[in-house]
Image (cartoon, helix red, strand yellow):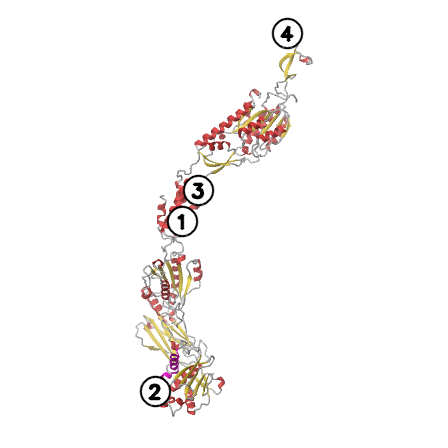
Amino acid sequence: MGALWIFAPLALAPTVMSLGLVLGGLAGFAGLIFALQRLRVRHRSRVVVTTLFWREAVEESRARTLVERFRHPSTYLLLFAIAGLLWLSVARLAADRSEGIQHTFLLDGSANMAAGSRFEDATRALLAALEGAPPERTQVLICGSTVRSLLAPGDDRALLKARLEGVRPEAVPASVERALVDALAERRGPQDGAASARRFAVFGHAPVSDEALADLGEADVFERFVATPGQASSANGEASAAGRSNLGIVALGAAPAASGVFDAVDLYIEVQGDDAKGANLSVTLGGEPVTLTRLGSPQPDAARWAVRDLRPLEAGMSESARTVAAALVGATSGDGLGFDDSATLVLPELRLIRVHIEQLGSSEAEAAIRAACEADAAVELIASPERADVLITSRSLAHPSLRVAEASEASASIEVRLAAGTALLDGQVRASDRPGHALVKVLGELGLDRVDATRLASELGRPLEARLIEGSPGEGRSLALWSELLRPDLSSFTESRAFPAVVGRALRWLAETPEVVPYRAAGRPVPKRLTGSRPPRVDLASLPAEPASLLDASSTRLARTASADGGSAETPMDDSGPWRLSSWVLLIALALLVGEWLLFQRGRIA
Amino acid sequence: MSETGSALPDLYSPEFLAAAQRLRLVARRVAPRGRFAEQRSKSKGSGLEFQDYRPYTHGDDMRAIDWTVYRRLGRVFVRLFEEQEDLPLYLLPDVSGSLWLEPTPRVIAGLQATLALAAVSLGQHDTVGIFPFADDLTVLQRSTSGKGRLASLAQRLQSVQPGGRTDLRTSLKRLGGLRLREGLVVVVSDFFDEGGLDAIAEALGSVRHRLLLVQLVRATDREPRALVGDLRLVDCETDEAHDVSVTPQVIQRYQAAYDRFAEGLADIARRRQAGLLALDVESDVIPQIARLFENGRREV
C-alpha cells in the first residue's frame, strides 16, 4: 500500500468531491485490485494434440483454493496508479476547494470597463476562475444596463464563451452593487443557514460600497479581480502613461431658456477630474461652436459651464442640426476612459403653437389674451379654427381650448379639465390620482401658483378656486378661467406680470408641445419637471423604472483613481490558461494505460 | 492445425525411396490364394525353397520324390518347399487433426513410414492398399502391386488432406466391411483416440488381419516442457477445454497417465499378437523401420 503515498499530494489537493470520498475511492481501488490479484487466475489458451492425459492428471489433483498468495507487486502498483489517477480525474481536481459553496461571478459591464482592455482582461480572468468552481453551484451574471445571467447553475461551461460573444461594456452606470445587494437579499430567509455560504467574485472595477458588503454573512467571501498593476491600458489599446488621471463629462443638460424665449434653451455642462479646472471643452450645436460661460464650482475637481439662450431653434430643423455635442479636446482628451470624454444631446423640435381666438364675450378679455399671444414668439395666431392647435373660446369644446367662461358656467374660477387616464406632463401623476396633488402640479406648470390669488380674490370679492375635472376619453385638455379674471375693471390679473406667462404656459400645456429636453447628469436622476413625453430611462434590475444618468460619476472617478494609483489591493487576475491539474492527471493516467497495454501485449507483465 | 496446414512438404526424396526399397517384410502367415511371392509361408508345398520331407502319398508330384533318401532309407519321401505367396499389405495412415497440429506435424513421419512399408511390399511383389483414416476410413488405393506403382502411391499420399477426430472403431469397422483378402494391417497413428485404450482395444479386436501398430511419438508427449502456468488446454480434435495449473505435481500425474497409456497399448498389441513400433517423428523414419526387420526379414 505504499503506492498510496504517490497519491497523497494529489488526493489532498482540492477536488469537487469531498476529501473523504476521494481517499475512500483510492483505498477502494487499492483493495479491489489487490483482491483481483489474489483471486484471478489467468488462463492462457493453448491447443494441444490431446487432453487425455491432462484430464487424468487434473482429476487426480486437489481442488483449487479460493485465495492465492499475492503475486506481481509491480503490476499491482501500475494498475493501482492507473485506477487512482482516473479516480482523481473523475474527482476533478480544482484550484478551489468549494464544498457546498455557492459561487456567483459578477462581470462588470458598465462604462468603466470600456477603458482599454479591461473588459477583455476581466473576461479572461472570469473564464480562468470558472475552471475551479463546481458547475452545479456556479452562476455568472453580466452587470450592464441590466443584470443578465450568462451561466446558470448546472449549465455547460462551453456555453459561456458563446454567450460572451458580442458582449461589450455599455455606457451605463455600474450595477454590480445592485446585483450583489439583490443576490444577498435572495439568500435571506428562515430556510437559509450557515450551509449556504456564498462566494461573490467581481470581475471589473465597479464600486461596491461598504454598506453593501456589510450584508455578507460570516461564511461568505467577497473577491474582486482587477487588472494587474502596471498593465492598465488606454482606450486606444496602448499603455497609458503612469499617473494620468481621468477627466470626464458627468453632466450635460438643457432647460428652457431662463429668459423665457420660446426658441432658446440654456445648456449646462459639468466636468469632473483632477484636471477639471484646466479642461478644454468644446460645445457645438449642429456642428457650429457655441460660446460657453464658465460657472463657479464648489468642488475642486469639478468644472461647470453654461450656455445661455442657445438659439436659433427653428421648426423643421433636422436631428443633426438639433444635436448638442460636448467634447473634451486637446491635452485633456484620450485618457483612460473614453466614454466620458464626449456627450451629445438632441434638442426637441420646437414648433409654433397655432392659436385661433374666437369671439369672446368680453372684448377686454379678448384684447388682453390677444396681446399676450402676440407677445409670445411661440404662438401663431391664425384665422382658421380648423388648423388651430388651441382654441381660445367661450364655448365648452372637446378640442383643446382656453375657455373664458362666465362664473355661472364654470364650476370654479380656474377649471382644468383632463381626459380620464391622461398623464400629466411628467407622467408621474394622472388626473385620477390624488386630484389635489395633480391640481397643484398643473397649476405649477401653468404658472398659476405664482398668481397673487389673495389679491385677485379681494378684487373680485370672492375667493378663487381651482378644480381639476376628469373629462371623457378622447377629450382634449381645456383650461377655463372666469371671464371676470380677464376684465380689467374687475381684476388686475391681465395687467400683472404673470398674465403673459400664464397664457403662454397655458397654451403650451394645452397644445402638449414637447416642453423640455432631457437633462442628463452622471449619477443623478433626471428632474421630473424637465422630462419630456419620452423621458430617458435606464432600467436596472429590481429597480423601478426611474430616469437615471448616462454615466456613472464613480466610473469617472474610478477610472481616474485606477490609472493614477497604478496599483490595487484586490486580487490580480490569474491568466493561467485552460490546462488545469485534473487535465494533467487524466493525461498521465491515459499514458500509463497505454504503457500497461503495450507491456501486456509483449508479455512483460502478468 | 499445424503450420503446414493441408499442404504437405515434399515427403519423398529419391534417397528415401531407395532406402525404402531395401526393407523386406516377411509375414508369418500368408493367405492360401494368390500369386507366388518371396514371402515365407507356413504352407509346405512345391515352392522354390526346400524346407522338409514327408512320406509319399498317392497323388503327390513324382518330381518331388527325393530318390537320394529312397536309396538310403528304402522308403519314398517327397521334398517339401516353402510356399512363397504374396502378403497383402493394408496401410492405414492416421490423418486426424492431432497429426497436423505441431510445428513438425506427425503426419509427415506417418506418411513416410506408410510409403516405406508400401515400397517394401511392392518390391516383394505384394499388393498394397492404402486406407487413410480419421473419424472414418477412406480408400486412397484399394489394391495395387508392382514396383512401378510406388511413384503413383507417393503422389497420392502427398495429396492427403487433414481429417477430423480419431475414431478407430468406426475406421476399422469400415475396413472390415471392405472384405479384403487376409493380409497385414499396419496402423500408423498416434493412437490418441478420444475413447482411450478401451476404444483402441475394441477396434483392434475386430480386425481379422494380422496387425502391426506403428505409434507416432515424440519426446514432448511425455514431457510437455512448453506448458507451464495457468493454461486452458484445448483438444485440437474435440475442442474440449480444460483449465490446468501446471505444477510439478500435475506434471508427475500427467506422466504417470501417459505411461499407463503406453503400457496399455503395448498390452493390447501383445494380446493381439501384433507388432508395436514406436516411431519417433523427430528422427529419420527409414532407420527406425529397418530396426523392426533384422537381417532383411522379420517374422510377424
Give the magenta-colored segment's residue range.
A434-451
Subunit of label 2: A
Whole-number angstrom distance, CA of label 3 to CA of label 2: 110 Å
**Residue highlighted by disc 1:** A87
Amino acid type at circle 3 is Leu
**Residue highlighted by disc 4:** B73
Amino acid type at circle 1 is Trp
- Is B61 left, or right, of B294 in this rendering? right
- Residue drawn 35% across the image and 46% down it: A5
**Residue highlighted by disc 2:** A454
Amino acid type at circle 4 is Leu
Residue depth check, mark 3 versus mark 2: number of the one nearer the observer: 2
Is residue A449 one of those drawn in magenta? yes
Q: Earlier in the sequence, mark 3 or mark 2?
A: 2
In which quadrant of the rendered view does residue B129 lie? top right
Q: Are marks 4 and 3 in contact (CB under 8 Å)?
A: no
- Residue drawn 40% across the image and 55% down it: A578
SS at circle 3: helix
Subunit of label 1: A
Subunit of label 3: A
Residue depth check, mark 2 versus mark 4: number of the one nearer the observer: 2
Please tell me whether the stretch drawn in magenta is mainly helix, strand or loop. Answer: helix
Q: Earlier in the sequence, mark 1 or mark 3?
A: 1
Q: Are marks 1 and 4 in contact (CB under 8 Å)?
A: no
